[in-house]
Image (cartoon, rainbow, N blue to C red):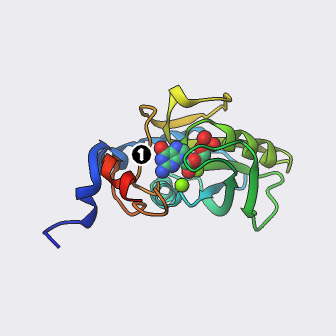
Amino acid sequence: MAEGSWYHADIDRVIISEEQIREKTAELAKQVSADHADAEGGLLLVCVLKGAVMFMADFARALGRHGPSAEMEFMAVSSYGSGTTSSGVVRILKDLDRDIAGRHVIVVEDIVDSGLTLSWLMKYLQSRSPASVEVVALFRKPDAVKVPVPVRYVGFDIPNEFVVGYGLDFAERYRELPYVGILRPEVYARS
Ligand code: 5GP
Ligand code: MG
Ligand code: MG
């Protein structure tokens, strides 16, 4: 294989660079920490697998530089629907490992697209009596929203196109890319 990473050849263009992600993550962590300096019991970060895994890891470390303390939980959900769109009918594949009652919860999301998954998740978490629930999402597609979800912290608003990288997959591939980009059309044709 030629020099460099295997995936560059599959990417049509980079939408958000590694450097931009790093800077924005630090900025979001600063904001969240300033707004929650006095959160009793610290924060409980809830990562929505698998897409948010990279953001969770980097965001948690950035938050750690400022505080308050943070604990991590992971959930996996699947929304029934055709391939690249979600339906809003959500199935829990992995639930929280513990009670979140009385805790200050921050949902750590990769991307808000239609908002259907997140809207369902917010209701689910709120039904478990946390002290508060807020969302930090690295990406949002404002033109794709079907249900308005209050996302307090947003990294980047991006165009309504299918993107991969930094946790986001196409058929379980491309999650390891350090940036977010758009695939070349040939990639879809060969799958
Ligand atoms: P929503 O319910 O808001 O439509 O999106 C649910 C999930 O679909 C997101 O959390 C994300 O994991 C996935 N998703 C939404 N848009 C994209 C995209 O452009 N690329 C990829 N790879 N996944 C996406
Ligand atoms: Mg997600
Ligand atoms: Mg996916």
Asked whether 37 or 112 is in front, the reply is: 112
Q: Nearer the viewer, residue 123 or 135?
A: 123
Q: Residue furthest bottom?
A: 1
Image location of residue 110, percent across then percent down: 52, 49
Residue denoted by label 1: 163
Q: Position of residue 189 (x, y in %)?
A: 37, 53
Residue 176 appears anywhere in the view: yes
Left-right relation of 9 to 15: left
Please say if 63 is above or below 16.
below
User: How many numbered marks have been drawn onto this rendered protein structure?
Assistant: 1
Residue at 68 percent of width and 56 percent of height: 78
Amino acid tagged 1: Val
Task: Locate residue 121, reporting x and y percent.
Answer: 73, 46
For the C terminus, which image quadrant?
Answer: bottom left
Please determine whether, in this image, residue 115 is positioned above or below residue 49: above
Q: Is residue 34 above or below residue 4?
A: above
Residue 114: image quadrant is top right
- Residue nearest the viewer, comparing 96 with 60: 96
Q: Is residue 33 visible?
A: no
Residue 122 coordinates in the image, percent (x, y): 74, 43
Residue 13 occupies quadrant: top left
Mark 1 Cβ and ligand 1 under 8 Å apart: yes
* Mark 1 neighbour density, 10 Å: few (under 14) some (14–19) many (20 or more): many
